[in-house]
Amino acid sequence: MSVFTRLVEELGRLLEPALAESATAAAIVLFTVLVRLALHPLNRAAFRGATPMAGLLPVLLQLPVFFLMYRAFSSSGELLDHRLLAAPLGARWSDALGAGGFLGAQGLVFLGLFAAIAVVAAWSAVRGRRAAAEAPVPVPAANVSAEQQAALRKLGGVLPLLSFGTLITAAVVPLAAGLYLVTTTAWSVAERAWFQHRKRSSL
């Protein structure tokens, strides 16, 4: 964990002249972008369906990064004193509510984070529904009943809404982990949109 902490601190020092006290928050966003850039080839292979494991591997590789982010801002350490505007990066939404309420200085930072996550989730849901609507209708298998087909269609309509679950996670993890979540989720949606655009333009 010390290597991760050192890396975030060094990125924060580089950004401090321009971003002052919010430099560490920006360093978390930059670190997340660097992780996603490193995973980009695997995600491209997953989109092309190169191997069955290709889609699962990028998710599995991100779990340790999220865990390190969570631990670094949950336990005592050098990073806990850093802030995003008025909110400490180690604070949770419950802390912000206790420190000034829903519209207090810290509460407004969390509301901004939740709004950003909601925008990304809505974008993901709209893209997911559009992709489902454009997908060719599969030929039903002989052993699938009409009720099962209807249930599958309903499930397909609900799945894009699961991206809003990130809001629940962001409400219970430290602010730093919430920044990681919104950045990586936005990257995922934008990356998939880019892949689909490239696929359509190559047809």
Image: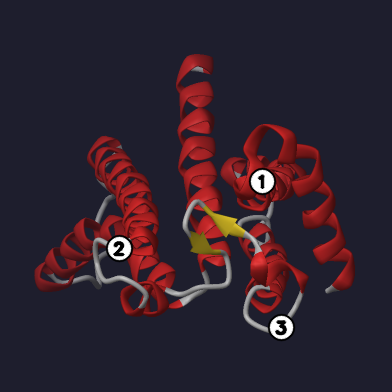
| Quarter of the picture holding the N terminus | bottom right
- The disc labelled 3 sits on which kind of residue? Ser
Give the residue drawn at x 53%, y 48%. Answer: 183
- Near mark 2 (Cα within 10 A), the count class, few <14, some 14-19 or many ≥20, is some
Against 61, residue 126 (above or below) is above
The spot of residue 80 in percent (x, y) is: 66, 71
Residue 104 bears which disc, if any? 2
Give the residue drawn at x 26%, y 38%. Answer: 130
Residue that mark 3 sits on: 76
* CA–CA distance in space, label 3 to label 1: 20 Å
Report helix, strand or loop for mark 1.
Answer: helix
Give the residue drawn at x 27%, y 35%. Answer: 134
Give the residue drawn at x 26%, y 59%. Answer: 161
Does the CB distance between marks 1 and 2 fall below 8 Å?
no
**Residue nearer the viewer, 109 or 124:** 109
Against 46, residue 105 (above or below) is below
Q: Earlier in the sequence, mark 3 or mark 2?
A: 3
The spot of residue 62 in percent (x, y) is: 67, 63
Q: Earlier in the sequence, mark 1 or mark 2?
A: 1
- The disc labelled 1 sits on which kind of residue? Ala
* CA–CA distance in space, label 3 to label 2: 25 Å
The spot of residue 84 in percent (x, y) is: 53, 54
- Near mark 1 (Cα within 10 A), the count class, few <14, some 14-19 or many ≥20, is many
Q: Earlier in the sequence, mark 3 or mark 1?
A: 1
Report helix, strand or loop for mark 2.
Answer: loop
Q: Which quadrant of the view contains residue 200?
A: top left
Is 182 left or right of 44, judged from the image as shown?
Answer: left
- The disc labelled 2 sits on which kind of residue? Gly
Residue 186 visible, this orientation: yes
Residue 23 bears which disc, if any? 1
